[in-house]
Image: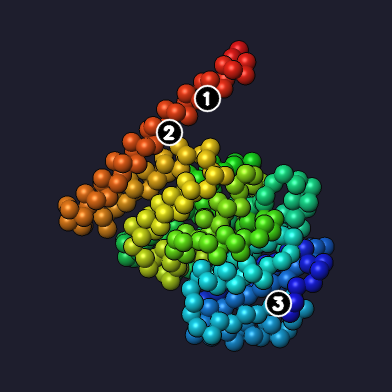
Amino acid sequence: MKNESDTMLNIGILCHNHFNFIEKCINSILCQKTSYNYNIIIVDDFSTDGTREILENFFQQNQNKIELILNNDNIGALNSAKILAQNAKAKYVCFLDGDDYWCYENKIQTQIDFLENNPDYAGCFHDAKIEQYNKSNDANYNHRTHINWKTYSQFNRYVEDFMPWDLLVRNIIPTASLIFRNTKVSKFLNNFNASALSLSWALHLEIIKNSKLKYFNEIWSVYNDHPKGASKIHDITVFKRNNVKILENLLKDPEWKFYKYEIYDTICKEYRSMLKSKWELEKSWKEYKKSLNAYKKYIRIANKFDIDQLKNDFNYVRNNGLVE
């Protein structure tokens, strides 16, 4: 199915072996009550568990709403996301993983109504419920899940006007919650040189720069926490190092030049988290010291930018007559 010129929203779904989840995901979209035209673009990354049969059935029954793209090989989340972005041509865009779903039938209507009336916002998002799909008695597995939390807002700090610095410090936006203005994110994804492990966060940083997001303090989507999620099968230090790479890339972007202290400070926090993890502590002292020295280097840089920023703030306050 081709995108029609009056399509207001493209909903991109990326799935791979989501047999247990994908039906609920798609139905939660099709039951939306909205006056806005939307279509669903699904990229299946060579599922082998029966997901494709479910997708093909949905496509046959909803060809006016669904565009189905079936990868001939498993090309990974980043390359699949590039395909989604290339096909997203509507005014607004949102992405879901195939194991997420929406739980509010007026989600599209409410969020696009807001964006239509508030052009100074790049997008808007909301809280999300966390569902434990497969609980375990394994302590290591449980440590890697959100088992102690029921919603994203319990371990992230959200404010009504969510600014770039709020996202920089790793307040994570639930992927399925965000609807944003289509700013041609294909270029960003094509130039993205980190791994896909923190791709949503990196993409959200691109969307919010030079702008802000609106936060609705409501639970309108659900995140399924399950054993096959990427955060359960990769070493946590791999995530942290990838986050550092994403932050280092921001330092090269002139549009982030006013946030250098926040960037360096977050890099330090990522390194500190790594250094306190069991994965890093089980390494030899020689290997551990490499990470420790990198942390020390970034601590020095962060302190310098912190002092410089405070000096600039002091001069700005005095020179602009802001002292009471």
Q: Is residue 269 above or below residue 185?
A: above
Sequence-earlier tag: 1 or 2: 2
Q: Nearer the viewer, residue 102 or 38?
A: 38
Q: SS class of the residue under badge 1? A: helix
Q: Is residue 6 visible?
A: yes
Residue 81 percent across, percent down from the top left: 56, 68
Q: Is residue 277 left or right of residue 60?
A: left
The amino acid type of the residue labelled 1 equals: Asp
Question: Spatial distance from mark 1 to mark 2, Cα to Cα?
Answer: 12 Å
Sequence-earlier tag: 2 or 3: 3
The amino acid type of the residue labelled 2 equals: Phe
Residue 141 percent across, percent down from the top left: 35, 64
Q: Is residue 112 left or right of residue 239?
A: right
**Label 3 crowding class (10 Å Cα cut-off): few <14, some 14-19, many 20+?**
many
Q: Quadrant of residue 183?
A: bottom right
Q: SS class of the residue under badge 2? A: helix
Question: Spatial distance from mark 1 to mark 3, Cα to Cα?
Answer: 51 Å
At 63% from the left and 75% from the top, the residue drawn is 42
The amino acid type of the residue labelled 3 equals: Ile
* Residue bearing the label numbered 1: 313
Q: Is residue 136 above or below residue 236?
A: below
* Residue bearing the label numbered 2: 305
At 64% from the left and 69% from the top, the residue drawn is 86
Q: Nearer the viewer, residue 103 or 297?
A: 297
Q: SS class of the residue under badge 3? A: strand
* Residue bearing the label numbered 3: 66
Q: Quadrant of residue 227?
A: bottom left
Q: Is residue 237 above or below residue 58?
A: above
Find the residue positioned furthest to the left.
285
